Amino acid sequence: VKVISGAAAVAATTQLAPIGGNQRTIYEVLKGHPKVSVGFSQKELTDAAKAALTDVSSKHRASRAKDALERLISCGLITKSEGGKFLLSQSPDHPPPAPL
């Protein structure tokens, strides 16, 4: 077992907040989505993310949505349940911390 102390310990136990503008936009839209309490299928999640990025040209929207969703999943703000639904891991009442 490796013991972590100091700043590394804080970083290891702290969830990352969405850092990019697209990530923040998508996360905010998902928090207010009607399916937030029951979870999203992969298609619903992708469609909602693409729809949230209205300021991105349609030519790049799908790839930007995919990149932002991958980051939100990798930092733990979106998780996949055993039933295959994607869920927000932060409740709407307790949003993730603002980026530093």
Image (cartoon, rainbow, N blue to C red):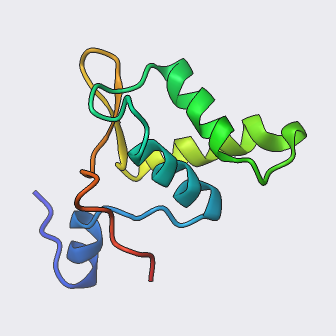
- In front of the other: 87 or 75: 87
Residue in front for this viewpoint, 16 or 95:
95
Instruction: Report whether 1 appears left or right of 7.
Output: left
Image height of 34 relative to 17, above or below: above
Residue at x 63%, y 44% (from the top left corner) = 52
- Could you say where residue 42 lies in the image, as x and y percent from the top left? 50, 21
Residue 72 x, y percent position in the rendering = 47, 49
- Figure quadrant of residue 10: bottom left
Quick one: which residue is furthest to the top in this view?
A: 83
Res 81 seen here: yes
- Name which residue lies at 10% across and 57% down: 1
Count how many numbered circles sit on residues in the image.
0
Residue 27 rendering spot, x and y as whole percentages: 47, 51
* Percent of width and height locating residue 24: 53, 60
Q: Residue at x 33, y 27 (%)?
A: 39
Q: For the C terminus, give its image quadrant.
A: bottom left
Q: Quadrant of residue 60?
A: top right
Q: Is residue 73 visible?
A: no
Q: Is residue 13 above or below residue 45?
A: below
Q: Quadrant of residue 9?
A: bottom left
Left or right, 21 with reference to 1: right
The residue at 33%/64% (across/down) is 96
Q: Quick one: 33 or 94, which is closer to the camera?
A: 33
